[in-house]
Image (spheres, rainbow, N blue to C red):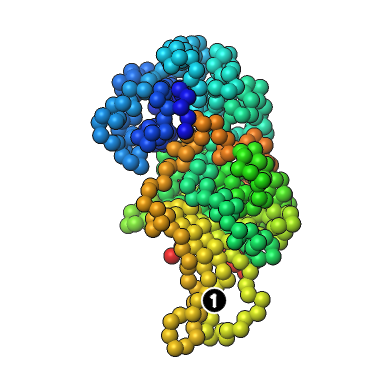
Amino acid sequence: HSTQPTIFVIFGGTGDLNQRKLCPALYNLFLEGFMPRQFAIIGTGRKEIADSKFRTTLEEAVSQFSRTGKAEQKKWGEFAANLYYCPTDFNTPKTFENLKAQIEEKQAEFGGNAQIIFYLAVAPNFFPIIAECLQKYKLAQDEDNSRIVIEKPFGHNLETAKELNTLLSKIFSEKQIYRIDHYLGKETVQNMMAFRFANSLFEPLWNRSFIDHVQISVTEQLGVGDRGGYYEGAGALRDMIQNHLLQLLCLIGMETPISFDADEIRDRKVEVLKAMRSFSPEDIRFGTVRGQYSKGWVEGKEVPGYRSEAGVDPHSNTETFAAVKFHIDNWRWQGVPFYVRTGKRLNQTSSLITIQFKDVPHHIFSPEVTENWQQNRLIISIQPEMSIRLQVQAKRPGVNMVLNPVDMVFDYKGTYDTDSPEAYETLLLDAMTGDQTLFMRGDQVEAAWELVMPIINTWESKKSLNFPNYPADSWGPEEAEALIARDGFHWFHLP
Ligand code: BG6
């Protein structure tokens, strides 16, 4: 862990992300001894509030959102003594002078060798102005000791992502830029690399000769909640597939890196994106489905349809569900479809990767004893269950030969008695220690946009839709079942 004194500057200090994720994560790192002895967290925002108010707001947030809850008062007091607030109005760049003064004061107190991490937890339209102010006030000139962490969304499309990369690269070097995709910080997602590259068992099977198809399914029971304003301009494809789901796909699809070096791993991942088949109009027609939820009942309570959510246009065509069939055109994966789906207000909250292996070449058991026949599957459950299951056929105990599928299970709960850190804990610690492995490089983000742009453009050009087309608490639009059923498969979910 990093022992270098560290100053965190959180733009959007009074915002939701800091309260729900960042501050609780930093507090847990503090409790577990991962924070350097000397650190300061300076929150900024438009509101004029005192340090004391900032501290009490975050105290409440941590009690509510930290996985460990707020520990005894003494610990919180020690942590909170490092929290400061500095009002900053991005539209009046002069207010950055106060911020600069506060940073310099802390620098002096820490002996002048603190690293500074600027965390942009604000709406994306503020990214450019903040970056420019950091340059103007010479706050991020030290390439080795200053970093900028950027939250999603990184661009609204390929063009704006490129613009943002260009702007950032004028001010920072790539090694200073940490583009967050919080899925990469999840314990089970990191384990995918251990699973694939620390075991010799799976690699020989990890290709088109043995794998039939792959499914990546991230379903959520929650609706859009109070994020309608943001979500209206995004939709499921931008919000989830362009970033999180494609990153999961890269982890399954990537070639073996020669080391665990950040750029080596990011090179292998970007190669997957580059090998992915571009979408023809035909592929979009038959290989993509979008949907939007209508009202329905969830656990005995009526929930509104998307078009009635706060901040949403009553005639909105924004998709809250998307399913896409991808192909990776290389030797390893030729002919193996990757089906990806995600949506809100679905029947289950669950992130699952299912790798279905090919059927046995010849069946020796008669159909009567193999009624529940199931091809072998490897199921990586990312959340809420954290497990890896290998589904195999077994003989059911009894005097007759009857087969049924059983699971060989590795589950975190039964194996480890320690809690897993939250994604943001891992990622914030990595930003402090300067490890970019789990962050997105500029070319990765652009390659992912490039891949989805034809779908976005086609979808946006067609305005007459039969939306809403799936009720809350369902598995999404029927067309999504048809998409995969046409190839003889069906979406897998845990019981
Ligand atoms: C965010 C999306 O990036 O990820 C949200 O903007 C989504 O819409 C969330 O709900 C899902 O993250 P998690 O960690 O709850 O699976």
- Give the percent coordinates (x, y) of residue 306: 46, 47
Q: Residue lying furthest left in this view?
A: 73
- Residue for badge 1: 373
- Give the percent coordinates (x, y) of residue 132: 58, 19
Which residue occupies 31% across, 26% down? 78
Query: Within the image, what quadrant is residue 48 found in?
Result: top left
Question: Of residues 381 and 89, which is closer to you in this image?
Answer: 381
298 w.r.t. 17: above or below: below
Which residue occupies 25% across, 34% down? 72
Which residue occupies 74% across, 57% down? 331
Which residue occupies 54% across, 76% down? 373
Question: Of residues 197 and 368, which is closer to you in this image?
Answer: 197
Element at label 1: loop
- Give the percent coordinates (x, y) of residue 165: 64, 29
Left or right, residue 49 beside residue 72:
right
User: Can you see residue 73?
Assistant: yes
